[in-house]
Amino acid sequence: MTRILTTLTIAAFLLSGCGAIRDSRINPFNWFGRAESRAIPAEEVNPLIPRQNRMSSSYQPETRVPVARIDDLVVERVPGGAILRVTATAAYQDSFNVGLVPARETGPVDGVASYTLLANLPGGRHRLRVGAEQTRVMTEALYLSDKDLEEIRVIEVRGAQNSLTVRR
């Protein structure tokens, strides 16, 4: 009976010490915080007027556009780096070819890595269907190596309506 009581007492003291590590920088789950959302101001462009190609007067539709809304942004530590996982809601059903595209080709600026989540729209305006929100949800992930993460303190992912940011 005394051995069980002694073992339980020692286990309780050891487990109570784990609470101090939970909020420290040693814990890899704390390396990036929760995502913060902010609205993106609308452009001063009339969406009803088609964009013109500078080389010709014919209408050239954009094939890859920013996804409507960024819902979730998570950075998960893995051996050798981290995985940046983004969940978003597209404006239309059947959007495809989703990808995180760096905002700057030169890499992070002042510790801020900016990405835009782009997707192709289904062909032709007659095929644009809105449908239920659950049918427009998409997920994209990007691997960042430890070398990439050395320069990054803030990760920002932009959509058409909002952007999410995580900080170290």
Image (tube, rainbow, N blue to C red):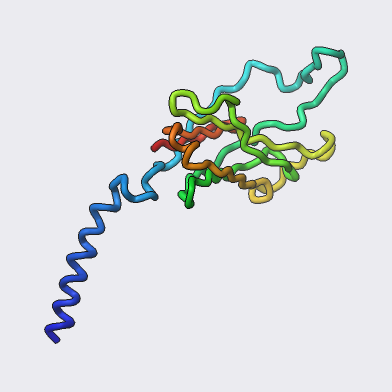
Which one is in front, 52 or 28? 28
Q: Residue furthest left?
A: 2
Q: Residue 46: where, in percent of width, then height?
A: 70, 18
Q: Residue at 42% across / 33% down in the picture?
A: 153
Q: Using residue 162 as the reference point, say whether residue 27 is left or right of it.
A: left
Q: Using residue 83 as the reference point, say whether residue 67 is left or right of it.
A: right
Q: Residue 158: where, in percent of width, then height?
A: 56, 32
- Quick one: quadrant of the N terminus? bottom left
Q: Residue at 31% across / 45% down in the picture?
A: 25
Which one is in front, 148 or 52? 148
Which one is in front, 126 or 144? 144
Q: Residue at 51% across / 31% down in the picture?
A: 113
- Quick one: quadrant of the C terminus? top left
In the displayed structure, would residue 97 be above or below residue 112? below
Which one is in front, 158 or 152? 152
Q: Residue at 48% across / 34% down in the picture?
A: 155
Q: Residue furthest bottom?
A: 1
Q: Residue 24: where, in percent of width, then height?
A: 28, 47
Looking at the rendered structure, the number of numbered marks drawn on it comes to 0
Q: Using residue 100 as the reference point, say whether residue 58 is left or right of it.
A: right
Q: Residue 112: where, in percent of width, then height?
A: 47, 28
